[in-house]
Structure formats: structure tokens, C-alpha cells
Image (cartoon, rainbow, N blue to C red):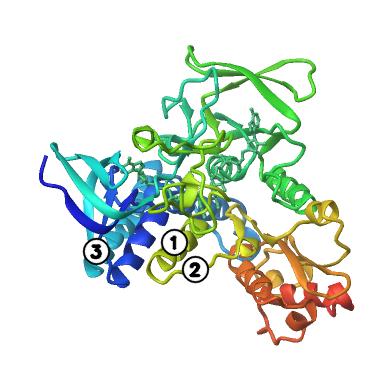
Amino acid sequence: ATEAEEKDLVIVGGGVAGYVAAIKAGQAGLKVACIEKRGSLGGTCLNVGCIPSKSLLNNSHLYHQILHDTKNRGIIVGDVKIDVAQLMKAKDTSVTGLTKGIEFLFKKNNVEYIKGTGAFQDEHTIAVNLIDGGETSVRGKNIFIATGSEATPFPGLTIDEKKVVTSTGAIALQEVPKKMVVIGGGIIGLEMGSVWSRLGAEVTVVEFLGQIGGPGMDAEISKLTQKLLTKQGMKFKLNTKVTAGDDSGASVKVNVEAAKGGKEEVLDADVVLVAIGRRPYTSGLGLENIGLEADEKGRIVIDQEYRTKIPHIRAIGDVTFGPMLAHKAEEEGVAAIEYLSKGFGHVNYGAIPSVMYTHPEVAWVGQNEAELKAADVKYKIGSFPFSANSRAKTNLDTEGIVKILSDAETDRILGVHIVGPNAGEMIAEGTLAIEYGASSEDIARTSHAHPTLSEAFKEAAMATYDKAIHY
Ligand code: FAD
Ligand code: NAD
């Protein structure tokens, strides 16, 4: 081991939370080191999450559209085939370009990048097992834990990332499976299920709850989304639990039954995707050496300023509370550095958007109807269908709605829920509206360019307190 060197800040984990904090620390003039064990920066998101999945979603959508949605547009195509190896290569190119970009940003902002696995030796020292062999240690006046999350395993099924896969295997299959069973109808299940369904797999999603998309998705939007995905060929078994699995044969068998109990059924698949959620990852971090404990869900407990009970040690991103989203991790990376360098920082947890990148996309921000009802808030609903939007009509892509929930008394926008083309881009306007405390009338009186999909947003806003024009 080399002599321990003292930094202002040592960050364990080079995912979105960690790398953003590292860059911000460099910009603030702090002496900072970031330790990452993967051999590549950007964490789950850039390497095996957001980025590779969106590459596959984009290209599988193109393929699906060329197969099923060209003739009526006056486009005649010949022999369309899928080349899975090239599909994966295109994905890898996007990933490498972006992860290398972070390395460049580290150099530009004087961040020391240490490639290895870090573990607490004491409250100020991280011992590092270097990827290239050997060990070192680094001392920090401050330490950030940004070690992220991992897929929650399903008891009884052994993940081999070939037959029984998490999202990591699902973004790297070498061929299109004939039959795929997805356990969990949350965001990962629906995004990755979409990819392989578009490429020709018969996909069945088994979901414990009575709706897809997880509890954050507005029930009306979830129902509509399920209808649209069903039309594309995906099958759903809701209110259904997986009771057992058998991966010993050539195919994988999954036993399912009604969540409330009932007749059992055995599903057979070439590939089973386990997508029942993710859990904070702190394995091998040596938390026991400094007396830090995680809560019952594995999350590192922090205060408002991201401090653990050892105040110079903070935790940000998936490893702690809140939605497991890259842009949430990024906001926390920035805010934690602001607390450290200036003494104040801020993240508005009420204005963090969620996007599911299926086609059509689903996006929401703020509260849904069930949440408002539970909080006994009186609200108005304005909704507008894309079938009445001129741009959606010219694009022959008219499925979905914009739905805006606003306070019945003040007209302040409380929630925006969209299923439709480009919903993921459109939700930025809803997020900004909530961040600025806009009323639905503020939005409706704002000129939106014609013809754009955003006009559906304006008209939904208008419909909350008045009538929409085009519907
Ligand atoms: P991570 O990105 O998990 O980074 C933590 C890093 O720490 C890892 O690289 C790990 O190797 C490293 N590490 C752990 N322990 C140690 C140690 N002891 N020493 C050194 N290094 C260590 N979110 C979105 O907002 N949009 C999306 O479209 C989206 N798509 C996703 C798709 C998939 C398939 C998955 C799995 C996730 C997706 N997410 C998406 C979620 C997003 O990836 C996470 O919220 C985000 O990566 C969290 O960032 P993080 O920095 O907290 O953790
Ligand atoms: P999730 O929590 O979104 O969904 C898991 C689903 O599995 C839930 O609907 C749950 O009811 C269901 N479930 C749990 N146990 C089950 C069982 N035994 N049988 C049947 N169903 C069961 O988790 P995920 O889809 O695995 O995603 C993990 C995390 O990654 C999420 O926090 C998500 O936000 C993030 N992510 C985000 C994006 C995005 O932003 N586009 C994409 C992928 C992943």
C-alpha cells in the first residue's frame, strides 16, 4: 500500500450521483478523488441502464415501425431483417462514447479517477483494491457514498444473465427469444419487454399489483398504456404472483397464481426477466468498520443535507432514499456539493419527472389522482387526446392523452400525466410549471408553436378551467 493522501472529498462510486458530485467538486476548487470499480464511469445508468436500454428501445421501435407502419405512409420496403449483433454494437458505441466523455470531464475538472473497489478502513480513510492489481488508500476530509443499487433477485431462480436475466442480461441477449416471461410490470419490465416483443418474442408480463407501471403511474394512464402495449402484442397477467421457478431444464418454468390465491399455472419461457425492483448496494463497502448501518430496505440513512450520522460522510443517489432515477441522483450530486462548499443546497423532490420510454412514451410529474384523493385535495382534471392534435395527426401517431390535475381552488398545477408520442420531452414543461408554481391558466395563455405536440399540453391546461378548442 502507498502512503495515504488527504483530499477535501473522496467519492465512492462513479455513477451519475458520484460523477456529477465529482465534477461539481472540481469546479468548486475542491481536491477530489472518485473511486469506481466497474472499469468505466457512469455507473448503472450509462453502462447497463438508461443509455443501453434507450438505444435498444429506439432501434427496436424503428424496426417495428418499418415492419408494421410504412405502407399507409406511402413507403414500400423490401426484405426487412434484424441483425442482433449489429443492434448490440450500436448500443455499445453509444455507451462507450458517453462513458469516455465522463473520463474527459474528470480530467477537465481536475478529478482524480481511481479504478478499484473502495472500502472504509476508518471514518476518513478508504482502502482501495485496484483493478490493475495492488492496493492503495486515500484519505478524505469528507466522503460521499454513491455506490448505487442492484437488481433484487427472485428467490428460487438463479440469475445466469442468459436464461434467467436481470436488465443487465436483457440488454445483451445474443438472439431474440421465442418466449419471454417478465416478472414485474414496472418500468424495466415494460421497457425491456417492449424491446424483445418488437423484435419478435412472445412476451408475457406477470405483475403482482392490479396495474402496470408501478404505483406512481396514474391509474387511468396505466390502463390506457396497457391497452396500447397489448395491441402491440404484449400479454399481461395482473394481480398475479410468481410462486416458484425451475431453471434446471432447457427452458425455464415459472409457476404463477392469482395474488389472492387460486389455481396455479405454469408458464414456459426461453428467457425469464426478473424485474421486481432494485435495492441499494453497499456490499463490501466496510460500513461495519465505521459503525454505519443501513435501514431495513438497505438504504443509508441521511438527514436533509445528505449527512449520515457521521457528519462528514454523506450519501446520495440510489443508495439512499427517494426514486431510483438518474436525474434525481444528478440533482443530489449537485446539492450535496453545494451543502459542502457553500452551506446550502436544494432539491425539489415534488418536481422530479418519471418517464417510461416505451412507444408511446409515458411521463408524469407531481401527484396522481389516487395520491390527491388520499391527501383529500380537491382538484380539477383537464385532458386532451393526441387524436385531436394536428402534429400527431400528420405523424400518424395519435395514441394517448395529456392529463393535467390542478387545484380546484387556486388552479395551481398539481400533476401532469402523459401517454403519447414524445411524452418524455413534453414532461419538461409540466416539471417547469410545477417548479414555478404555475396555474393551468398560465400554461393555457402561453403561446405554443403550431403544429406541435405541445399544443396538446396547452389544450389540456385550458380544459382544466375552461373548454379545449380542438376537442
Ligand atoms: P449507480 O449508477 O448504480 O452507480 C454506482 C456506482 O458505484 C457503480 O458504477 C458501481 O460499480 C460503483 N460502486 C459500488 N460500490 C463500489 C465500491 N465499493 N467501490 C467503488 N465503486 C463502487 N433512470 C433514469 O432516470 N432514466 C432511465 O431511463 C433509466 N433507465 C434505467 C434502465 C435500467 C435497465 C436500469 C437498471 C436503471 C435505469 N435507471 C434509469 C436508473 C438509473 O440507472 C439509476 O437511478 C442511476 O444509475 C443511479 O445512479 P447512482 O450513481 O446512484 O448509482
Ligand atoms: P419497479 O419498482 O419499477 O417495478 C417492479 C414491479 O414488480 C412492481 O410493479 C411490483 O409490483 C412488481 N413485483 C414485485 N414483486 C413481484 C412478484 N413477486 N411478482 C410479480 N410482480 C412483482 O422496479 P424495476 O422495474 O425493476 O426498476 C427498478 C428501478 O429502476 C426503478 O426504481 C426504476 O425507476 C428504475 N428505472 C427507471 C427507468 C426510467 O426512468 N425510464 C428505466 C428502468 C429502470
Residue 352 x/y as whole percent: 60, 61
Q: Circles 2 and 1: CB distance less than 8 Å? A: yes
Q: Measuring 82% from the left and 78% from the top, which residue is drawn there?
A: 462
Element marked by disc 2: loop
Q: Circles 1 and 3: CB distance less than 8 Å? A: no
Q: Give the Cα separation between the discs numbered 2 and 3.
A: 20 Å
Q: Give the Cα separation between the discs numbered 1 and 3.
A: 15 Å
Question: Can you tell which quarter of the image residue 292 is in?
Answer: top left
Residue named by callout 3: 31
Earlier in the chain: of badge 1 and badge 3, it is 3
Amino acid type at circle 1 is Ala
Look at the image and tell me in which quarter the C terminus lies: bottom right
Q: Measuring 64% from the left and 72% from the top, which residue is drawn there?
A: 435
Residue 113 or 46: which is nearer the viewer? 113
On screen, 429 above or below 122? below
Going by the image, does 320 lie left or right of 342? right
Question: Can you tell which quarter of the image residue 111 is in?
Answer: bottom left
Residue 72 x/y as whole percent: 66, 61
Earlier in the chain: of badge 2 and badge 3, it is 3
Say the numbered circle drawn on residue 345. 2
On screen, 433 above or below 417? below
Element marked by disc 3: loop
Residue 117 x/y as whole percent: 27, 40
Q: Measuring 63% from the left and 65% from the top, which residue is drawn there?
A: 351
Report if residue 471 is visible in the image.
no
Look at the image and tell me in which quarter the N terminus lies: top left
Residue named by callout 1: 336
